[in-house]
Image (cartoon, rainbow, N blue to C red):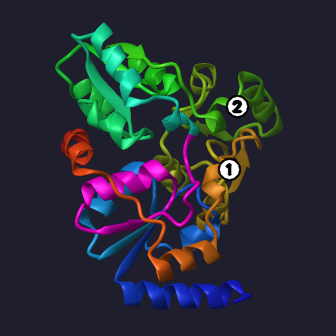
Amino acid sequence: MSSNKSLKTRIREVKEERNAVILAHNYQPLEIQEIADYAGDSLELSRKAAGADADVIVFCGVHFMAEVAAILAPEKLVVLPHPGAGCPLADNITAASLRRMKDKYPQAAVACYINSSAEVKAESHVCVTSSNAVAVVASLDENEIIFVPDQNLADYVARQTGKTIIPWSGYCPSHHVATSDDVSTARETYPGAALVVHPECRPEVVQKADRVLSTGKILNFSRHSGYSHIIVGTETGIIPRLQVENPEKEFYALSKEMICPDMKLIDLEKLLKALETLEPRVTVPESIAAPARQSLDRMLAVV
């Protein structure tokens, strides 16, 4: 199949045959977001995975996201169209290193960002996403919180909650690349534009933003705010969708370097092949899935 149109037609046909649902993260290529049944941020897609009325979940994202789907919907078959779609941030911490940190701070609760492996989630009290991290951490009885693996999100949560946050030293390369100089340049280049950034950005970038928002909330802000020009400080894959949804507005990347290569690995051909073969599958042993599910359920009970 040579054309995107014929690929999309075949994807829809096989999806029906397999009784599958296609989930796509907001950083995926626009053609993948458009063919998906649901496109959203990690929290939105976690909820869709948990309640999906389908036999098969095809997750167009990265490995830890497919793991979350497998954990929350253990009765379903979960497929990740590209086996190499990973996350450098999630790879930055292991369950063993988290256990050593817990031994050092036994009085602290552990909050893990959803950008982490199933094994790390299993070692954590509660999971968080960028859209609910502040609310979830604020809800914890403990004042001291080990927060892994993103140091920038940890800093943001500490400032917003007043809790004593013990951060892991790690960051998302695609967000950490944006600097204070990029903010200054963007402000000069696009005067009057709103600057919205993801809380995975460096603290000095976050502190200069007009809004600090998850990808889902960036989409919502862009739809409903009065701003007609918006500088976007997150992975650039979201910008084509923002432009399609808001054709009367203009969107600019805070930095053109804010690209996640792993989020670009899935295309229509790989998606079709995954539906046809139901491979590569993502599974999580129940011995890990059960405690990981508890940390995710505690999050979903808060927001």
**Relative image position of residue 256 (x, y in whole percent):** 77, 44
Q: Residue drawn 69% across and 46% down?
A: 259
In this picture, which residue range is highlighted in magenta?
60-87
x 83%, y 37%: residue: 189
State which quarter of the image contains the C terminus.
top left
| 169 relative to 244, above or below | above
Is residue 37 among the parts visible in the rendering? yes
Q: Where is residue 250 in the image (x, y as percent from the top left)?
A: 71, 55
Q: Is 291 positioned to the left or the right of 229 in the image?
A: left
Query: Camera-side residue: 8 or 273?
Result: 273
* Residue 145 in picture, x, y percent from top left: 30, 17
Q: How far apart are marks 2 and 1 (CA)?
A: 14 Å
Residue depicted at x 29% and y 76%:
54
Element marked by disc 1: helix
Percent position (x, y) of residue 64?
44, 48
Q: Is residue 161 visible?
A: no
Q: Does the magenta stretch include residue 268?
A: no
| In-front residue for pair 246/242 | 242
The residue indicated by pointer 2 is 177
Query: In the image, which disc is placed on residue 261?
Result: 1
Question: In which quadrant of the rendered view does residue 237 lie?
Answer: bottom right
Residue 66 colored in magenta in the image? yes
